[in-house]
Image (cartoon, grey):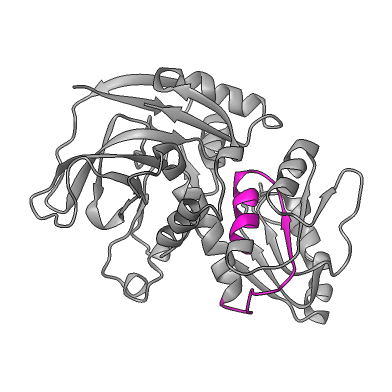
Amino acid sequence: MQNRCVYLDKYHNMTIRINEIPEPADDEVLVKVAVNGICGSDVHFYADGKLGNFIVDEPYIPGHEASGVIAALGRGVRGFMEGEKVAIEPGIPCGKCRLCLSGRYNLCPDVRFLSAPPVDGTFCDYVCVRASFLHKIPEDMPLTKAAFAEPAAVAVHAVSRAARITPVAGKTGLIFGMGAIGLLTLQAFHAMGGGYAVCADMLDNRLALAGELGAGRCVNVKNEKIPERAADIVFETAGSAAATQNCIGAAAAGGVIVQVGWPSGNIVPMDIAGFIEKELTYTSVNRYANAFPAALGFIADGRIKTEPLVTHTAPFEDTAKTFEYVKNNPEKTIKALVLN
């Protein structure tokens, strides 16, 4: 057996190295990785060498949307067996601080997020993960579907953040950005009781898919303006400064805005007068907490469909070529999967 690992360096080069298969610590499980999804953040690190405050200084292993099979158990692990299929939750917190103990472990100041430089991720054959951050999947669920648990958890967490502020049931929604996260947020919004949804993007093929997945109206923002006060709950999933600026105008009075995407440059001018006049609530999403069980449940029962989002698959040895393709063809790519 060997452990092939894909490394990304600061010069945007990807190379495969053969490493030792790691030994799981007492509280860890060794997972044989089967599928990795390529996330937008992975592409940012590949193309730009950074995302937000994370910078690629030294070669590291990207990847955090992964599923696989248990290969070995640490001595203290209970409740898992070799051969079981699992999805990996990649944000590993300390488990002891105030935020962890209050259930908001995604905000733990000592969280180790797989694939956030310099922490290695899951583009490898074998990885060790703390057992409490592995999620069993139904035996009949394909591992390609299970690899969507991580981005689906982002979507579930986004809708849950809105639900903390206002009941979602029957509310109208607007989602900016019909990439993978936007399309998953649309489905999570409906799965969690949301009503009529408007979807906005600049690409007709993505909007067509949104329509197939339940959008009541699709708006190409190159040709059409988003109506004022269009929705009770607005989700920004595009990571676009322009879309972020439009959220206030698009929200109905008393509405909620959920910032999911990370606009480039970090600083976005906002219409604070409109924000105050409508008495809006603005909240944000930092990955997810306690969202994987619901995400996997929605995938299992079909309320979140993943197959239509897969636009490209490739073998592990073509990981570098696949990253290059995704970087150069954003209009053709929603989710690319790499198969070990």
Q: Which residue is at 73% across, 77% downward? A: 280
Left/right of residue 273 with respect to residue 51 in the rendered view = right
Range of residues picked out in magenta: 164-189
Q: Which residue is at 71% across, 54% downward? A: 214
Q: Does the magenta-highlighted stretch encompass residue 183?
A: yes
Left/right of residue 254 with respect to residue 73 in the rendered view = right
- Identify the image quadrant of the C terminus: top left
Q: Which residue is at 58% across, 67% downward? A: 192
Residue 301, given in percent of the width and then of the height, sits at 49, 55
Q: Which of 282 and 337 is in front in this view?
A: 337
Residue 49, given in percent of the width and then of the height, sits at 52, 34
Quarter of image, res 98? bottom left
Is residue 43 placed above or below 254 in the rendered structure?
above
Residue 208 visible here: yes
Q: Nearer the viewer, residue 63 or 197?
A: 197
Residue 113, given in percent of the width and then of the height, sits at 38, 50
- Identify the image quadrant of the N terminus: top left
Is residue 192 placed above or below 115 in the rendered structure?
below
Q: Nearer the viewer, residue 7 or 315?
A: 315
Residue 2, given in percent of the width and then of the height, sits at 22, 22
Count of numbered circles in the view? 0
Residue 12 visible here: no
Left/right of residue 339 with respect to residue 161 in the rendered view = left
